[in-house]
Every structure is written in structure tokens, then in C-alpha cells.
Image: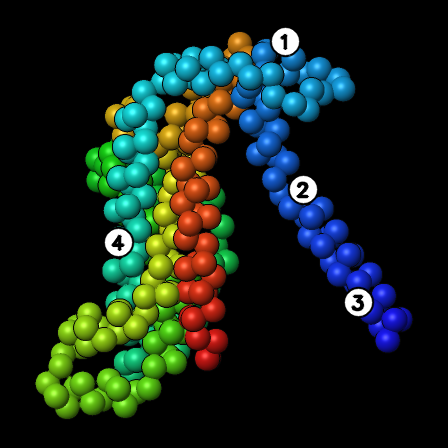
Amino acid sequence: MNRDFALKTLFRVLHYTVLSLAVIVAIFPFYWVVVTSLSTSSHVFDFPPVMVPLWHFHNYVRAWDEAPWARYFFNTVFIAAVTTALVIVTSSLAGFAFGQLRFPGRGALFVLLLSLIMIPNEMLLIPNYVLLKDLNWLNTYQAQIIPYGASVFGIFLLRQFFLSLPVELYEAAAIDGCSRIRYLLKVGMPLAKGPIATIAIYIFLGSWNAFLWPLIVTTSSSVQPIQVGLATFLSAHGTAWTRLSAASVFTTAPIMVLFLILQRQFVEGVSQGAIKA
């Protein structure tokens, strides 16, 4: 009895020790950015480094004054919200079609769709840029929204969920005169709240953190998101590390808080997306 208790206690101690170390490793980069944002330029490269904040809050004031952050935040929220809404619409329609409807070539089309995951995004930069240039969409909101208006992940997750719904439910609705679109809106999507919430969180976070594509297709701060705005502190004469760190903190904190609030919905949505093949 005592031996079993000792083994369980040892296992529990090791378990929480490993978890604590993992948490420290995960949190330390953000903590270091906060420390740097509250430091001075002369102390940024000190060795050994200063591990406690020096409380120079004026770095935040200077960082905010050096760029139109209110506009950047508006652009980011607008682009992320519209992109998320568009992805939910396209994912719901495609997921419902692949999961509930029967049509020739459904399996082959779905495999072809999944194969798009194998294509690196970098390969699509040039053709997408040329296409947007021909459409005169460069330096616009739609250039940052339309190319990301569909998500293979979203389609896959909702397809798996709709596969888990009994076909008899759809057939019963059809007998009562319910159209496919009405069934999707009134029955399918309300039942799929979990997966839809997961897709919304995933796409919103991805859009908030987008940098390379907006940097390529935009040139004006009137349409640029906050991640491109952070490049304000990078120049050929050097990097303002303290102000860049301060800007990184106040642009990252809102999305971190949002994820912490919605993390349960994210996990539940992934688990609710049926594993049924």
C-alpha cells in the first residue's frame, strides 16, 4: 500500500514538473518581449540579460505615436471578421455537400480538395499576385480577403460533422418539403455550432497574424493590418527593439485574451467534428 502510494506520488510530481517546464518554455518568449518592451535601448543586449522589467512605460507611448495603430486595428478586425464570415459560408456549403449529398465523383473531388493542403502557400504568391493585379485589386481590402475566403480545414471539419448526422434526418426534412438550403440553415448549421466556432476562431487568428501576403499586396496604411504595421520599426539604420517589443505586446495581447476566452469552444469544436470517415 505504501509503495503504491509512493509511486503514485512520484508519478504525480514528475507529471506536474514536466507540465510546469512546458508552460515556462511556452510563456518565456512572450515574457521576454514584455521585459524588452519595458527596457531601454542600452540594456537590450546586456549579458547576462536583465530578466526583470525596468518599467519604462514611455516605450509604449512612443510606439503608439509612431504609427497609425487605430487604423491598423480597424483594418485587421475588419479583414479578419469578413474573411471568417466568408470561410464559414463556403465551408458550410461545401461541407454539407460532401457530407450529406450524394453525387458522382464526390469522393474523388474531396480527395482532390484535400490534396491542396500539399501545395505550399509560397507557390501561390506569384500567380495570385498577377491575378489580383489584372483585377486592379492591389492595395485593397478584397485582395486580403477573397484569396482566403475558403478553407480546406473548414470544409474537412464540417464534412466530417455532417457525415455523423443520420441521413434519415435529411430525408425526413425533404419529405416535409424542406429544401437543401433551408435544411442547412435551420438544421445543419445550428447543430454544427461547435465546429463552426472552431473554424471561426482558427480563421480569425490566422487572419489577425497574416503578414507576408498583406505586405506583398498592400502599400498604404489605410488598408494594411497590424502585422505589417510592426514593420514600421524595422529600417536599414537598425531596429528599435524596445518600441517594436512594445508594439508587439499591445497588438498580440487582444488576440491572446480572445483565444483564452474561447479556447474551450475551440477544443470542443475539434472533438465534435466527427472522426467518421
The residues bearing labels 3 and 2 have C-alpha atoms spaced at a distance of 26 Å
Q: Amino acid at mark 2?
A: Val
- Do the numbered discs 2 and 1 sit on residues whose CB atoms are within 8 Å? no
Q: Earlier in the sequence, mark 4 or mark 3?
A: 3
Q: Earlier in the sequence, mark 2 or mark 1?
A: 2
> Taking 159 as reference, is 88 above or below it?
above
Instruction: Between label 4 and label 1, give the one nearer the viewer.
Output: 1
Question: Which residue is under mark 3?
Answer: 8
Q: Amino acid at mark 3?
A: Lys
Q: Earlier in the sequence, mark 4 or mark 1?
A: 1
Q: Residues within 10 Å of mark 1 (few under 14, many from 20)?
A: few
> Left or right of 9: which side holds 118?
left
Question: Which residue is under mark 1?
Answer: 42
Looking at the rendered structure, the secondary structure element under dot 3 is helix
Q: Earlier in the sequence, mark 3 or mark 2?
A: 3
Please tell me which residue is depicted at 19% across the width and 70% down the height of the picture: 185
Q: Which mark identifies residue 235? A: none
Q: Earlier in the sequence, mark 3 or mark 1?
A: 3
> Taking 22 as reference, is 244 above or below it?
above
> Left or right of 132: which side holds 115?
right
